Image: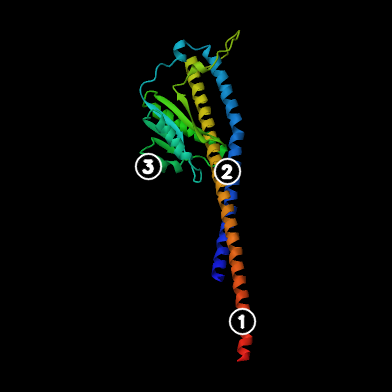
């Protein structure tokens, strides 16, 4: 009986230590998600400034510069999957979204933990990288993705490129959001009415090309930030579920400990009562 109680107390102590770890992981995930969301408005403001510059540059460009022509066959997808564990179905949903679209020729995969799941689905990435540990490092990651994309595009005649980034909702969990990245669509940007065209030092075609690359960089930054936030929000939900399970298990162990103690007390009372009854009988003999 004493061994059972000791074992129950050991299990309860281990459970409470695990509860501390779960709370810490949830707090870290919440902090990281908040940090990422705080940076998104700045990236969108930056993209808006570049968009305005593109609109003004379009007024200077020839029609052929604004419409690069129809992209030849070929497809690539920039896909974000989980970097670390305890993110629920994050990677599974993202990989399922990849399989739902037209099969790409090449996949640029971001996230270490999801690479193994991709291999199980016979998806071999053309290029892969780890997600950054802090949201402030996202611009460096976006730059690396852009460099890898443009290096590949140089040998593949500008095929179609999509980016699939996740968003998180409390009701639906991870929601993959596909977005066309290339060929660059200049028709999205309005040409402002100006009495005098802007002063430039570059040929309009070169200026538009550089602005388009800068806008793509901003889009990759936003996608990476959303992925960073979504993974940590998924981890928060997983830790919340784990906390609920730990609370249930703790309540059960506490109840079991009380039951074992009660059984020990009952056994001791029975033993004492039996000894008290047996003593007069032995004395009478």
Query: Which residue does the numbered mark 2 point to in the structure image?
Result: 29
Residue most toward the bottom? 285
Residue 85 x, y percent position in the rendering: 49, 46
Which mark sits nearer the N-terminus, 2 or 1? 2
2 and 1 marks in contact (CB < 8 Å): no
What residue appears at the point 61 percent right and 63 percent down from the top-left corner? 258
Q: Between tags 3 and 1, which lies in front?
A: 1
Q: Is residue 239 above or below residue 222?
A: below
Give the image quarter of residue 77.
top left
Residue receiving disc 1: 275
Q: Secondary structure at mark 1?
A: helix
Mark 2 and mark 1: Cα distance apart in space: 60 Å
Q: What residue is at 56 percent from the left and 36 percent from the top?
A: 171
Give the quarter of the figure containing the N terminus. Answer: bottom right
**Element under label 3?**
helix
Q: Is residue 43 left or right of residue 84?
A: right
The mark closer to the camera, 2 or 1, is 1
Residue 120 bears which disc, if any? 3
* Residue 52 image offset from top left, x and y in percent: 57, 18
Asked if the residue under mark 1 is in contact with the one under mark 3, i.e. CB atoms within 8 Å, the reply is no
* Separation (CA) of disc 3 from disc 1: 68 Å
Q: Is 279 situated above or below 182?
A: below
Crowding near the residue tagged with mark 3, few <14, some 14–19, many ≥20 C-alpha atoms within 10 Å? few
Residue 278 x, y percent position in the rendering: 61, 84
User: Residue shown at 56%/71% (left/top)?
Assistant: 2
Disc assigned to residue 97: none
Q: Residue at x 56, y 25 (%)?
A: 47
Against 276, residue 184 (above or below) is above
Element type where label 2 sits in the image: helix
Between discs 3 and 2, the one toward the N terminus = 2
Up the image or down, 133 lies above or below 285; here it is above
Q: Residues within 10 Å of mark 2 (few under 14, many from 20)?
A: many
């Amino acid at each position: 009986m004493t061994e059972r109680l000791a074992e129950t107390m050991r299990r309860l102590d281990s459970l409470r230590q695990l509860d501390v770890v779960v709370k810490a992981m949830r707090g870290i995930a919440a902090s990281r998600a908040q940090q990422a969301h705080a940076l998104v408005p700045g990236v969108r403001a930056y993209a808006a400034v570049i968009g305005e510059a593109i609109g003004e540059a379009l007024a200077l460009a020839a029609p052929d510069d604004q419409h690069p022509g129809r992209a030849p066959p070929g497809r690539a997808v920039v896909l974000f999957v989980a970097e670390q564990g305890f993110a629920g179905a994050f990677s599974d949903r993202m990989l399922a979204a990849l399989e739902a679209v037209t099969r790409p020729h090449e996949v640029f995969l971001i996230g270490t933990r999801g690479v193994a799941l991709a291999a199980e689905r016979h998806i071999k990435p053309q290029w892969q990288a780890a997600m950054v540990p802090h949201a402030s490092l996202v611009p460096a990651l976006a730059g690396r993705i852009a460099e890898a994309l443009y290096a590949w595009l140089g040998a593949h005649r500008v095929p179609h490129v999509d980016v699939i980034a996740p968003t998180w909702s409390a009701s639906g969990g991870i929601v993959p959001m596909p977005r066309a990245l290339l060929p660059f669509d200049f028709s999205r940007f309005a040409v402002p009415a100006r009495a005098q065209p802007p002063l430039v030092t570059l040929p309009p075609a070169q200026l538009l090309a550089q602005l388009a690359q800068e806008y793509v960089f901003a889009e990759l930054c936003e996608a990476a930030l959303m992925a960073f936030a979504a993974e940590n929000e998924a981890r928060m939900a997983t830790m919340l579920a784990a906390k609920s399970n730990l609370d249930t298990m703790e309540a059960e162990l506490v109840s079991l400990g009380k039951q074992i103690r009660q059984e020990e007390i009952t056994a001791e009372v029975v033993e004492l009562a039996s000894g008290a009854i047996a003593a007069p009988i032995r004395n009478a003999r």
